[in-house]
Amino acid sequence: MSFAKTLGLRYLRSKEGSAFISLISGFSVAGVALGVCTLIVVLSVMDGFETVLKNRLAKGEFHILVTASDKAEDQYFAEDDARIADIYNLSSNVLTVSPVLKTEAIIRTKDRVSGVSVRGVKEAQLNAIAGLLVEASDDSGEEQVISKAGLWLGKELAYQLNILPGDKVQLISPTETEGPLESIPRLRHFVVEGIFETGLPEKDLQVAYIPIEAMREFLRKPGKINQIELKTNSFEGSIPIAARMRFSFGENYRIRDWKELNAHLFASLRLERIAMFLILSMIVIVASFNIITSLNMLVLEKRKDIAILKAMGATSKQVGRIFLVQGAIIGNIGTILGAIVGLTICYLLKTSKVIELPDIFFDRSLPVEISPIYVLGIVVTAVLIVMIAAWFPARAAARVSPLEGFRES
Protein backbone atom coordinates (compact mmCIF):
# COMPACT_ATOMS: atom_id res chain seq x y z
CA MET A 1 0.00 0.00 0.00
CA SER A 2 1.33 3.45 -0.93
CA PHE A 3 2.37 6.14 1.52
CA ALA A 4 -0.72 8.33 0.78
CA LYS A 5 -3.19 5.45 1.10
CA THR A 6 -1.69 4.24 4.38
CA LEU A 7 -1.91 7.64 6.07
CA GLY A 8 -5.29 8.43 4.48
CA LEU A 9 -6.83 5.27 5.94
CA ARG A 10 -5.20 5.90 9.33
CA TYR A 11 -6.54 9.45 9.53
CA LEU A 12 -10.08 8.22 8.78
CA ARG A 13 -10.12 5.92 11.80
CA SER A 14 -11.99 7.33 14.74
CA LYS A 15 -9.85 8.50 17.63
CA GLU A 16 -10.72 10.23 20.83
CA GLY A 17 -9.75 13.63 19.51
CA SER A 18 -11.26 13.24 16.07
CA ALA A 19 -14.57 11.49 16.81
CA PHE A 20 -16.52 14.56 15.67
CA ILE A 21 -14.65 14.59 12.38
CA SER A 22 -15.42 10.90 11.90
CA LEU A 23 -19.09 11.64 12.60
CA ILE A 24 -19.14 14.31 9.88
CA SER A 25 -17.41 11.87 7.52
CA GLY A 26 -20.15 9.32 8.28
CA PHE A 27 -22.82 11.89 7.40
CA SER A 28 -20.91 12.59 4.17
CA VAL A 29 -20.97 8.89 3.24
CA ALA A 30 -24.70 8.74 4.01
CA GLY A 31 -25.37 11.87 1.95
CA VAL A 32 -23.52 10.56 -1.08
CA ALA A 33 -25.27 7.19 -0.76
CA LEU A 34 -28.69 8.86 -0.50
CA GLY A 35 -28.02 11.01 -3.57
CA VAL A 36 -26.82 8.09 -5.69
CA CYS A 37 -29.69 5.86 -4.55
CA THR A 38 -32.31 8.53 -5.29
CA LEU A 39 -30.85 9.27 -8.72
CA ILE A 40 -30.82 5.60 -9.72
CA VAL A 41 -34.41 4.97 -8.56
CA VAL A 42 -35.92 8.14 -10.05
CA LEU A 43 -34.17 7.88 -13.42
CA SER A 44 -34.98 4.16 -13.66
CA VAL A 45 -38.67 4.87 -13.06
CA MET A 46 -38.66 7.68 -15.62
CA ASP A 47 -36.90 5.43 -18.12
CA GLY A 48 -39.50 2.76 -17.39
CA PHE A 49 -42.35 5.15 -18.18
CA GLU A 50 -40.65 6.16 -21.45
CA THR A 51 -40.16 2.49 -22.42
CA VAL A 52 -43.83 1.72 -21.72
CA LEU A 53 -44.83 4.74 -23.78
CA LYS A 54 -42.66 3.64 -26.71
CA ASN A 55 -44.08 0.13 -26.54
CA ARG A 56 -47.61 1.46 -26.67
CA LEU A 57 -46.76 3.68 -29.61
CA ALA A 58 -45.14 0.70 -31.33
CA LYS A 59 -48.40 -1.24 -30.94
CA GLY A 60 -50.30 1.55 -32.67
CA GLU A 61 -51.57 1.41 -36.21
CA PHE A 62 -48.65 3.13 -37.88
CA HIS A 63 -45.02 4.09 -37.44
CA ILE A 64 -44.76 6.38 -40.49
CA LEU A 65 -47.38 8.88 -41.67
CA VAL A 66 -47.58 10.31 -45.19
CA THR A 67 -49.70 13.42 -45.78
CA ALA A 68 -49.78 16.23 -48.31
CA SER A 69 -47.26 18.97 -47.58
CA ASP A 70 -48.18 22.60 -47.01
CA LYS A 71 -46.88 23.33 -50.52
CA ALA A 72 -49.47 21.02 -52.10
CA GLU A 73 -52.55 22.70 -53.60
CA ASP A 74 -54.93 20.10 -52.16
CA GLN A 75 -54.62 18.13 -48.91
CA TYR A 76 -56.45 15.24 -50.60
CA PHE A 77 -54.64 13.12 -53.17
CA ALA A 78 -55.54 10.14 -55.32
CA GLU A 79 -55.03 6.61 -54.08
CA ASP A 80 -52.22 5.24 -56.24
CA ASP A 81 -51.68 1.48 -56.23
CA ALA A 82 -48.34 1.87 -58.01
CA ARG A 83 -47.12 4.26 -55.31
CA ILE A 84 -48.17 1.81 -52.59
CA ALA A 85 -46.31 -1.00 -54.38
CA ASP A 86 -43.19 1.20 -54.52
CA ILE A 87 -43.41 1.71 -50.75
CA TYR A 88 -43.46 -2.05 -50.18
CA ASN A 89 -40.41 -2.36 -52.42
CA LEU A 90 -38.44 0.18 -50.37
CA SER A 91 -37.71 -2.31 -47.59
CA SER A 92 -38.64 -5.78 -46.48
CA ASN A 93 -39.30 -4.28 -43.02
CA VAL A 94 -42.52 -2.62 -44.26
CA LEU A 95 -45.42 -4.74 -42.98
CA THR A 96 -48.52 -2.79 -43.98
CA VAL A 97 -49.33 0.26 -46.10
CA SER A 98 -52.82 1.59 -45.39
CA PRO A 99 -54.53 4.38 -47.38
CA VAL A 100 -56.79 6.38 -45.05
CA LEU A 101 -59.35 9.13 -45.51
CA LYS A 102 -59.65 10.96 -42.20
CA THR A 103 -61.72 13.87 -40.96
CA GLU A 104 -62.61 15.57 -37.70
CA ALA A 105 -66.32 15.46 -36.98
CA ILE A 106 -68.96 15.84 -34.31
CA ILE A 107 -70.81 12.73 -33.18
CA ARG A 108 -74.26 13.29 -31.74
CA THR A 109 -76.70 11.01 -29.96
CA LYS A 110 -80.11 11.91 -28.59
CA ASP A 111 -78.75 13.89 -25.65
CA ARG A 112 -74.95 13.94 -25.93
CA VAL A 113 -72.33 15.40 -28.26
CA SER A 114 -68.60 14.82 -28.63
CA GLY A 115 -65.79 15.52 -31.05
CA VAL A 116 -64.32 12.52 -32.82
CA SER A 117 -61.63 11.67 -35.36
CA VAL A 118 -63.36 9.57 -38.01
CA ARG A 119 -61.11 7.33 -40.07
CA GLY A 120 -62.23 5.76 -43.32
CA VAL A 121 -60.10 2.65 -43.80
CA LYS A 122 -59.96 -0.29 -46.18
CA GLU A 123 -61.15 -3.81 -45.50
CA ALA A 124 -57.72 -5.17 -44.54
CA GLN A 125 -57.36 -2.59 -41.77
CA LEU A 126 -60.95 -3.15 -40.63
CA ASN A 127 -60.22 -6.87 -40.33
CA ALA A 128 -57.29 -6.07 -38.02
CA ILE A 129 -59.46 -3.79 -35.89
CA ALA A 130 -62.17 -6.49 -35.73
CA GLY A 131 -59.89 -8.46 -33.42
CA LEU A 132 -60.12 -5.60 -30.88
CA LEU A 133 -63.92 -5.56 -30.69
CA VAL A 134 -65.30 -6.12 -27.20
CA GLU A 135 -68.96 -5.65 -28.16
CA ALA A 136 -70.77 -6.04 -31.48
CA SER A 137 -74.32 -5.83 -32.78
CA ASP A 138 -73.81 -9.28 -34.34
CA ASP A 139 -72.72 -11.77 -31.64
CA SER A 140 -72.93 -14.84 -33.85
CA GLY A 141 -69.26 -15.58 -33.26
CA GLU A 142 -68.38 -15.20 -36.93
CA GLU A 143 -65.82 -12.70 -38.21
CA GLN A 144 -67.17 -9.20 -37.80
CA VAL A 145 -67.79 -7.23 -40.98
CA ILE A 146 -68.82 -3.58 -40.92
CA SER A 147 -71.56 -2.42 -43.28
CA LYS A 148 -71.48 0.72 -45.38
CA ALA A 149 -73.75 2.45 -42.87
CA GLY A 150 -71.89 1.02 -39.88
CA LEU A 151 -69.47 2.64 -37.47
CA TRP A 152 -67.08 1.27 -34.85
CA LEU A 153 -66.43 3.35 -31.73
CA GLY A 154 -63.76 3.22 -29.05
CA LYS A 155 -64.84 1.88 -25.67
CA GLU A 156 -64.14 5.12 -23.77
CA LEU A 157 -66.09 7.24 -26.27
CA ALA A 158 -69.01 4.79 -26.28
CA TYR A 159 -69.09 4.94 -22.47
CA GLN A 160 -68.99 8.74 -22.52
CA LEU A 161 -71.86 8.94 -25.01
CA ASN A 162 -73.78 6.08 -23.34
CA ILE A 163 -73.92 4.11 -26.61
CA LEU A 164 -74.47 0.41 -27.17
CA PRO A 165 -74.10 -1.63 -30.37
CA GLY A 166 -77.20 -1.13 -32.52
CA ASP A 167 -77.72 2.52 -31.51
CA LYS A 168 -77.91 5.18 -34.20
CA VAL A 169 -75.66 8.25 -34.15
CA GLN A 170 -75.30 11.30 -36.33
CA LEU A 171 -71.98 12.45 -37.77
CA ILE A 172 -71.64 16.14 -38.52
CA SER A 173 -68.67 17.25 -40.61
CA PRO A 174 -67.35 20.82 -40.28
CA THR A 175 -66.75 20.73 -44.05
CA GLU A 176 -69.64 22.62 -45.53
CA THR A 177 -71.69 21.72 -48.58
CA GLU A 178 -73.82 24.02 -50.71
CA GLY A 179 -77.55 23.87 -49.93
CA PRO A 180 -80.53 25.51 -51.59
CA LEU A 181 -80.21 28.66 -49.52
CA GLU A 182 -76.69 28.69 -48.05
CA SER A 183 -73.76 26.50 -47.02
CA ILE A 184 -74.74 23.83 -44.49
CA PRO A 185 -72.66 21.26 -42.58
CA ARG A 186 -72.56 17.73 -43.94
CA LEU A 187 -74.31 15.17 -41.82
CA ARG A 188 -75.14 11.50 -42.04
CA HIS A 189 -76.62 8.82 -39.82
CA PHE A 190 -74.62 5.71 -38.89
CA VAL A 191 -75.36 2.63 -36.84
CA VAL A 192 -72.88 1.66 -34.11
CA GLU A 193 -72.06 -1.92 -35.08
CA GLY A 194 -69.10 -2.48 -32.77
CA ILE A 195 -67.11 -1.15 -29.82
CA PHE A 196 -63.35 -1.73 -29.73
CA GLU A 197 -60.67 -1.44 -27.06
CA THR A 198 -57.05 -0.84 -28.04
CA GLY A 199 -55.56 -0.52 -24.54
CA LEU A 200 -54.87 3.18 -25.18
CA PRO A 201 -57.66 5.11 -23.40
CA GLU A 202 -56.82 8.36 -25.20
CA LYS A 203 -57.33 6.64 -28.57
CA ASP A 204 -60.49 4.84 -27.49
CA LEU A 205 -61.90 8.24 -26.50
CA GLN A 206 -61.23 9.99 -29.81
CA VAL A 207 -61.34 7.56 -32.76
CA ALA A 208 -64.13 5.99 -34.83
CA TYR A 209 -63.83 3.79 -37.92
CA ILE A 210 -66.02 3.51 -41.01
CA PRO A 211 -65.39 1.92 -44.44
CA ILE A 212 -63.37 4.16 -46.74
CA GLU A 213 -66.09 4.19 -49.43
CA ALA A 214 -68.61 5.46 -46.89
CA MET A 215 -66.17 8.20 -45.90
CA ARG A 216 -65.67 9.19 -49.54
CA GLU A 217 -69.41 9.54 -49.99
CA PHE A 218 -69.67 11.47 -46.73
CA LEU A 219 -66.96 13.97 -47.74
CA ARG A 220 -67.72 13.74 -51.47
CA LYS A 221 -64.13 12.83 -52.27
CA PRO A 222 -64.38 9.88 -54.72
CA GLY A 223 -61.09 8.00 -55.11
CA LYS A 224 -59.30 10.33 -52.66
CA ILE A 225 -57.31 9.84 -49.46
CA ASN A 226 -55.51 12.32 -47.24
CA GLN A 227 -52.89 10.11 -45.57
CA ILE A 228 -50.98 6.86 -45.92
CA GLU A 229 -50.02 4.94 -42.80
CA LEU A 230 -47.08 2.51 -42.69
CA LYS A 231 -46.32 -0.08 -40.08
CA THR A 232 -42.89 -1.69 -39.89
CA ASN A 233 -41.52 -4.69 -38.02
CA SER A 234 -39.15 -2.49 -36.04
CA PHE A 235 -39.95 0.72 -34.20
CA GLU A 236 -36.44 2.12 -34.62
CA GLY A 237 -36.15 0.68 -38.15
CA SER A 238 -38.93 2.96 -39.37
CA ILE A 239 -36.62 6.01 -39.23
CA PRO A 240 -34.34 5.03 -42.19
CA ILE A 241 -37.40 3.92 -44.19
CA ALA A 242 -38.97 7.36 -43.69
CA ALA A 243 -35.71 8.96 -44.86
CA ARG A 244 -35.82 6.96 -48.12
CA MET A 245 -39.44 7.90 -48.66
CA ARG A 246 -38.66 11.61 -48.30
CA PHE A 247 -36.13 11.25 -51.09
CA SER A 248 -38.50 9.38 -53.44
CA PHE A 249 -41.82 11.14 -52.76
CA GLY A 250 -40.80 14.73 -53.42
CA GLU A 251 -41.80 18.04 -51.86
CA ASN A 252 -45.56 17.62 -52.33
CA TYR A 253 -45.67 15.04 -49.53
CA ARG A 254 -44.77 15.23 -45.87
CA ILE A 255 -43.31 12.03 -44.38
CA ARG A 256 -43.04 11.81 -40.60
CA ASP A 257 -41.73 8.88 -38.59
CA TRP A 258 -42.84 8.08 -35.02
CA LYS A 259 -40.05 10.19 -33.55
CA GLU A 260 -41.12 13.28 -35.47
CA LEU A 261 -44.81 12.65 -34.79
CA ASN A 262 -44.11 12.57 -31.05
CA ALA A 263 -41.19 15.02 -31.01
CA HIS A 264 -42.71 17.34 -28.37
CA LEU A 265 -43.55 14.44 -26.07
CA PHE A 266 -40.08 12.86 -26.14
CA ALA A 267 -38.39 16.27 -25.92
CA SER A 268 -40.41 16.97 -22.76
CA LEU A 269 -39.44 13.61 -21.28
CA ARG A 270 -35.77 14.24 -22.08
CA LEU A 271 -35.89 17.73 -20.56
CA GLU A 272 -37.63 16.37 -17.46
CA ARG A 273 -34.98 13.67 -17.06
CA ILE A 274 -32.16 16.21 -17.33
CA ALA A 275 -33.89 18.51 -14.82
CA MET A 276 -34.40 15.67 -12.34
CA PHE A 277 -30.77 14.59 -12.72
CA LEU A 278 -29.52 18.12 -12.01
CA ILE A 279 -31.89 18.66 -9.07
CA LEU A 280 -31.17 15.32 -7.40
CA SER A 281 -27.43 15.78 -7.97
CA MET A 282 -27.73 18.61 -5.44
CA ILE A 283 -27.99 15.93 -2.73
CA VAL A 284 -24.49 14.72 -3.64
CA ILE A 285 -23.24 18.31 -3.85
CA VAL A 286 -24.59 19.07 -0.36
CA ALA A 287 -22.91 15.90 0.92
CA SER A 288 -19.67 17.09 -0.68
CA PHE A 289 -19.83 20.24 1.48
CA ASN A 290 -19.69 17.94 4.51
CA ILE A 291 -16.64 16.30 2.97
CA ILE A 292 -14.98 19.70 2.56
CA THR A 293 -15.81 20.57 6.17
CA SER A 294 -14.56 17.30 7.65
CA LEU A 295 -11.33 17.28 5.62
CA ASN A 296 -10.63 20.94 6.41
CA MET A 297 -11.06 20.21 10.10
CA LEU A 298 -8.75 17.22 9.73
CA VAL A 299 -6.15 19.39 7.98
CA LEU A 300 -6.26 21.86 10.87
CA GLU A 301 -5.91 19.03 13.39
CA LYS A 302 -3.03 17.40 11.53
CA ARG A 303 -0.97 20.52 10.73
CA LYS A 304 1.79 19.33 13.09
CA ASP A 305 1.81 15.88 11.44
CA ILE A 306 1.94 17.55 8.01
CA ALA A 307 4.87 19.68 9.13
CA ILE A 308 6.72 16.61 10.40
CA LEU A 309 6.06 14.74 7.12
CA LYS A 310 7.38 17.63 5.07
CA ALA A 311 10.40 18.00 7.35
CA MET A 312 11.12 14.31 6.74
CA GLY A 313 11.04 14.86 2.97
CA ALA A 314 7.44 14.39 1.91
CA THR A 315 6.50 16.57 -1.05
CA SER A 316 3.44 18.84 -1.19
CA LYS A 317 1.96 16.54 -3.83
CA GLN A 318 2.26 13.52 -1.54
CA VAL A 319 0.68 15.39 1.36
CA GLY A 320 -2.20 16.58 -0.80
CA ARG A 321 -2.71 13.04 -2.07
CA ILE A 322 -3.31 11.83 1.52
CA PHE A 323 -6.47 13.95 1.77
CA LEU A 324 -7.52 13.16 -1.78
CA VAL A 325 -7.40 9.48 -0.78
CA GLN A 326 -9.65 10.21 2.19
CA GLY A 327 -12.13 12.02 -0.08
CA ALA A 328 -12.00 9.16 -2.58
CA ILE A 329 -12.66 6.59 0.15
CA ILE A 330 -15.65 8.56 1.46
CA GLY A 331 -16.98 9.04 -2.07
CA ASN A 332 -16.46 5.43 -3.16
CA ILE A 333 -18.05 3.97 -0.03
CA GLY A 334 -21.06 6.28 -0.35
CA THR A 335 -21.38 5.65 -4.11
CA ILE A 336 -21.16 1.86 -3.77
CA LEU A 337 -23.66 1.78 -0.91
CA GLY A 338 -26.03 4.08 -2.80
CA ALA A 339 -25.76 2.02 -5.99
CA ILE A 340 -26.43 -1.25 -4.13
CA VAL A 341 -29.45 0.16 -2.28
CA GLY A 342 -30.77 1.92 -5.39
CA LEU A 343 -30.50 -1.18 -7.59
CA THR A 344 -32.11 -3.28 -4.86
CA ILE A 345 -35.07 -0.89 -4.65
CA CYS A 346 -35.40 -0.91 -8.45
CA TYR A 347 -35.36 -4.70 -8.48
CA LEU A 348 -38.07 -4.87 -5.80
CA LEU A 349 -40.22 -2.33 -7.65
CA LYS A 350 -39.80 -4.25 -10.90
CA THR A 351 -40.49 -7.74 -9.57
CA SER A 352 -43.20 -7.03 -7.00
CA LYS A 353 -46.20 -4.71 -7.10
CA VAL A 354 -45.12 -2.62 -4.13
CA ILE A 355 -46.59 0.55 -5.65
CA GLU A 356 -49.82 0.50 -7.67
CA LEU A 357 -50.69 3.31 -10.07
CA PRO A 358 -54.15 4.94 -10.31
CA ASP A 359 -56.84 3.60 -12.64
CA ILE A 360 -55.98 6.09 -15.39
CA PHE A 361 -52.87 4.01 -16.20
CA PHE A 362 -53.37 0.93 -18.36
CA ASP A 363 -50.58 -0.89 -16.51
CA ARG A 364 -51.17 -0.58 -12.77
CA SER A 365 -47.64 -1.59 -11.72
CA LEU A 366 -44.87 1.00 -11.55
CA PRO A 367 -42.63 0.59 -14.63
CA VAL A 368 -38.90 0.38 -13.90
CA GLU A 369 -36.16 0.10 -16.51
CA ILE A 370 -32.59 -0.20 -15.18
CA SER A 371 -30.19 1.31 -17.70
CA PRO A 372 -26.49 0.40 -17.21
CA ILE A 373 -25.51 3.63 -18.97
CA TYR A 374 -27.50 5.75 -16.52
CA VAL A 375 -26.16 3.84 -13.51
CA LEU A 376 -22.59 4.25 -14.76
CA GLY A 377 -23.17 7.95 -15.43
CA ILE A 378 -24.56 8.49 -11.92
CA VAL A 379 -21.64 6.66 -10.29
CA VAL A 380 -19.03 8.57 -12.30
CA THR A 381 -20.76 11.90 -11.60
CA ALA A 382 -20.92 11.23 -7.86
CA VAL A 383 -17.24 10.26 -7.69
CA LEU A 384 -16.22 13.36 -9.67
CA ILE A 385 -18.24 15.67 -7.39
CA VAL A 386 -16.64 14.13 -4.29
CA MET A 387 -13.13 14.31 -5.74
CA ILE A 388 -13.60 17.97 -6.69
CA ALA A 389 -14.79 18.64 -3.13
CA ALA A 390 -11.77 16.81 -1.66
CA TRP A 391 -9.38 18.76 -3.87
CA PHE A 392 -9.82 22.01 -1.89
CA PRO A 393 -8.78 20.62 1.54
CA ALA A 394 -6.01 18.61 -0.15
CA ARG A 395 -4.69 21.81 -1.72
CA ALA A 396 -4.81 23.58 1.66
CA ALA A 397 -2.87 20.69 3.25
CA ALA A 398 -0.26 20.73 0.50
CA ARG A 399 0.38 24.44 1.08
CA VAL A 400 1.16 24.03 4.82
CA SER A 401 4.86 24.77 5.41
CA PRO A 402 6.87 22.88 8.06
CA LEU A 403 7.70 26.12 9.87
CA GLU A 404 4.03 27.13 10.19
CA GLY A 405 3.07 23.66 11.42
CA PHE A 406 5.71 23.64 14.18
CA ARG A 407 4.99 27.24 15.20
CA GLU A 408 1.21 26.67 15.60
CA SER A 409 1.78 23.44 17.52
Image (tube, rainbow, N blue to C red):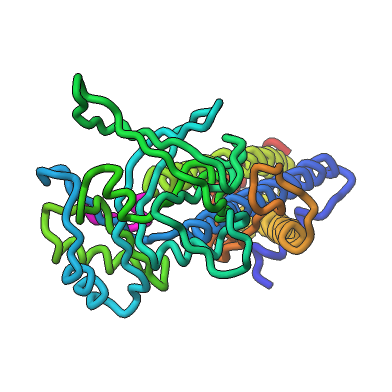
The location of residue 82, given as percent across then percent down, is 16, 71
The location of residue 269, given as percent across then percent down, is 48, 45
Please tell me which residue lies in front, 191 or 286.
Answer: 191
Residue at position x 23%, y 69% in the image: 84
Is any part of residue 20 visible from this angle? yes
Residue at position x 64%, y 40% in the image: 283
Please tell me which residue lies in front, 74 or 363.
Answer: 74
Residue farthest top in this picture: 181
The location of residue 408, given as percent across then percent down, is 69, 36
Residue farthest right in this picture: 16
Is any part of residue 392 visible from this angle? no
Vertical placement of residue 91 versus 315, above or below: below
Indicate yes or no whether the magenta region holds residue 99.
no
Vertical placement of residue 182 versus 203, above or below: above
190 left or right, relative to 5: left
Q: Quadrant of residue 240?
A: bottom left
Indicate yes or no whether the magenta region holds residue 258.
yes
The location of residue 93, given as percent across then percent down, is 34, 76
Task: Give the magenta-colored segment's residue range.
Answer: 254-261
Q: Quadrant of residue 337?
A: bottom right
Vertical placement of residue 341 versus 287, above or below: below
Q: Quadrant of the C terminus?
A: top right
